[in-house]
Image: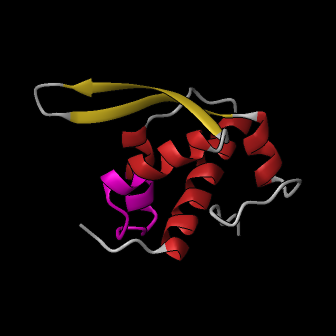
Amino acid sequence: MRTPDPNKDAQLAGILLRLVYVNHHAQLQRTNSTLLHGVLQREGYSDFSGDEVLTQLQLLRDGNYVRFEQRRDFNTNRLYLFNIEITREGHNLFNGINSDPAVDIR
């Protein structure tokens, strides 16, 4: 288990919100946690684990910035988040209308 790092967590939250925002504005199919983690890995953010992605997406949901459905595979005990979409509050945060120190939108 890693020691929490608020700066790293805020960075990941901001990157994830940006990816969901871009996906929405391109009118692409709603995304999922596996795809988002793969994009992070491909873009060189290899220091973020799949569990960290899940945690930050859940925190973004708790802040009402994104919404999604979730399902657990009981054979592997793995959690999948899918149909991830940005909310109005997420748009406002991303566009600088609102701010949240827990989400770094740089």
Indicate left or right for 92 with 39 as reference.
right
Q: Position of residue 49 (x, y in %)?
A: 32, 59
Indicate left or right for 1 with 47 as reference.
left
Q: Position of residue 1 (x, y in %)?
A: 23, 66
Q: Residue at x 58, y 41 (%)?
A: 62
Q: Residue at x 16, y 25 (%)?
A: 74
Q: Closest to the observer: 37 or 102?
A: 102
Q: Position of residue 83 (x, y in %)?
A: 51, 26
Q: Quadrant of residue 20?
A: top right
Residue sitting farthest toward the right: 97
Q: Closest to the observer: 37 or 62?
A: 62
Q: Position of residue 44 (x, y in %)?
A: 42, 69
Answer whether residue 86 is magenta in the image: no
- Give, as a single range, the part of the protein colored magenta: 38-53
Q: Closest to the observer: 93 or 25?
A: 93
Q: Residue at x 78, y 52 (%)?
A: 93
Q: Is residue 100 above or below residue 87?
A: below
Answer whether residue 49 is magenta in the image: yes
How many numbered discs? Answer: 0
Q: Quadrant of residue 41?
A: bottom left
Q: Residue at x 62, y 63 (%)?
A: 102
Q: Quadrant of residue 21?
A: top right
Indicate left or right for 86 with 97 as reference.
left
Q: Closest to the observer: 20 or 4?
A: 4
Q: Is residue 97 above or below residue 68?
A: below
Residue sitting farthest toward the left: 75
**Tell me, what colour scheme is on the image?**
secondary structure
Position of the C terminus by quadrant: bottom right
